[in-house]
Amino acid sequence: MAEPATPAEAPLRPPQAVMRLARMGAAHQTRLSFMRILLRRLKDENWRFERRLFDIGADGVGRAVYVARGPSHSYSLVAFSHDLPDEKRSDRVIAEAWDATFALFDGVPDAEDLARLERNVPLQEAGRVSERELCLSRANRSARLFAHVVDRLASGRQPDAGLVAEVGYLMRTTAVYGSGKFGAADREVIAGRAEFAAPFQAEMLTVYLIREFVMDLVEHLAASRAPGRAVRLDPALRRSFSIGNSTGLGMAPFLVNHPVLLNNWIAARERAVARVCALEKATPEEVAHFGTVLKRAIGNVALWRSQHELQVQKLADLGADLAALKAKAAQFDFHAPEPWRRLAEWGASAMTLEGQEQLIALILEPYGALVDDLAADMSADEEAAFQIAGQMPLEELSELLTQNYDWALGIDWAAQRANARAWYVSEEKLEPRLGQRFEEPIAQFEQPLCPGRDAARLEQALRDWPGHATVAEFLLACPEHRHIVRRVQITGAHPFAEIRDNTIDAEMLPIDMLRCKLAFFGAGRFDPRSDRWVRINMFAGAPYPQELGTFEDEAWAYGVPS
């Protein structure tokens, strides 16, 4: 049987534009976000879900087990619910107690497994788990919303829809650890399983099951308080709840430390956009689909709240951009050739970065059959790219350096502003931190998280070497450049591998890196609390496990339809 034809693709947006931090910090979820990849698989493969244990008292203390059964493997969320005093509730990574703690178990735990997990999971970092655990997580209740929902349901009424929309979640995770943290299974243990082939699928499954547990918990507490009078959440309102998340600097260096993976994420999205922009025509059904999702995106922005001045301005820009897009679409000629390319080009000239990135997400929505297969290209064998090509002539290395790091070679690295920051790892929590180089004694602990400066240093060193010399000869004499030589070679085959901005500049915003990564997760309603940490919601609008088989709203990530 002949291989299916590869869809036509328009030219990709250039890395010089796509990989700037300001644009990365305006990213939105798309059809290729990891939450949506997960739920499509769970539905298509007819996964089965079971609440195997729910031993929670009227005080909210106890344990529960939720099992997800796929074609080849089963996984269990083991949840422990605690009685946490208000004064101990904190989003800080240094917290030592939480309202709930979780582990994703590989298989179905027996009594001995549960006893072991109960001794360790509530302790989080202070405990230890085994290779049978794939993820470790914890969460705290929303101070404003959790008690309100329990009170309302116990009184026989639904929660206030306005408050639900404003807050969005009943619990907020403060970490979802995987890939070997605290004794859990390394990524290599599960990478060969089809359900975990795409990035961060174990972590997304963990959060998805946590959401189910939290909703069951709040209804259980209401029913325990008022048996016979309490009601369950209205299904549509229930679906609007997300799981919140607080994410800080610990996540930011990931994009620098995994250049091939970053390339594959961005390249998949950009190829999806290129496929849609190459379409010669759009059917009336596809145009109507776009219009429907645009309306939902406008509604989502209306509910998106932040008090951070940068995000307030971004939301104002996005609201104005989407209003302009709605007006443009109303009179746009979708019958002329390549309508989506022309609409995207209009957006690039008429909208802010927020609107431009929202637009490219929206034009993908009608075309799942055309773009969803690109999810298979979003993982990476990073070891394959790790080996340095020692036989490469230095003149070829210099060409790659000039081509992909021209932005860095033009920076005055002698200026204090260009070197104002330094990334290091805290001794207390072993978490990445960002300090002020000229105000704190941290330079000696600096991590290699500024490829731009290192590329400029490499370019300077290469001036003293003949072009016919090899990389191996150069590194034998100058091993301090080994890591940046590797990165330069990686960019030769992976054009989206490098952030094309100075990551230690005085004005650099770490939240731009956080948002880019979280948008690929599928997060929404970004609410920065500083330039270093952000709150988000996850799975808002998503179907619950028992609804997956009949749920047809692929655009759930834009919120519950009004």
Image: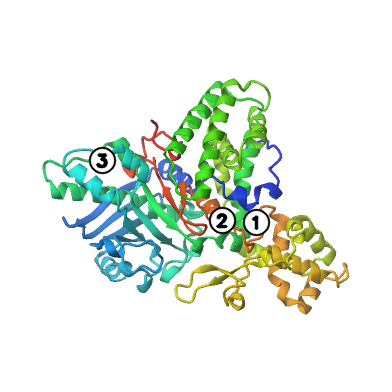
Q: Secondary structure at mark 3?
A: loop
Does residue 2 show up?
A: no
Amino acid on which disc 1 is placed: Ile
Q: Position of residue 348 (x, y in %)?
A: 66, 37
CA gap, disc 3 and disc 1: 44 Å
Circles 1 and 2: CB distance less than 8 Å?
yes
How far apart, in angstroms, are the residues tagged by discs 2 and 3? 35 Å
- Identified by mark 3, the residue type is Pro
| Secondary structure category for the residue under label 1 | loop
Write down the quadrant of residue 91 in the picture.
bottom left
Mark nearer the N terminus (2 vs 3): 3
Q: Measuring from the top left, give residue 253's x and y in whole percent.
A: 56, 63
Q: Which residue is mark 1?
A: 499
* Numbered label attached to residue 159: 3
Where's the C terminus, which quadrant? top left
Badge 1 local density, few (<14 within 10 Å), some, or many (20+)? many
Q: Which residue is mark 2?
A: 513
**Camera-side residue: 419 or 517?**
419
The image shows residue 132 at horizontal and vertical percentages of 38, 66
Mark in front: 3 vs 1: 3
Q: Which residue is more in the foreground, 53 or 240?
A: 240
Q: CA distance from mark 1 to mark 2?
A: 9 Å
Mark 2, other Cα within 10 Å: few <14 / some 14–19 / many ≥20: many
548, above or below 72, in the image:
above
In the image, taking residue 123 as reference, residue 156 lies left or right, namely left
Three-letter amino acid code at the position of disc 2: Met
Q: Is residue 140 left or right of residue 24?
A: left
Does 64 sit left or right of 125 as displayed?
A: left
Tell me if residue 389 comes above or below residue 233 in the rendering: below
Query: What residue is shown at x 24% (from left), y 65% (from top)?
Result: 111
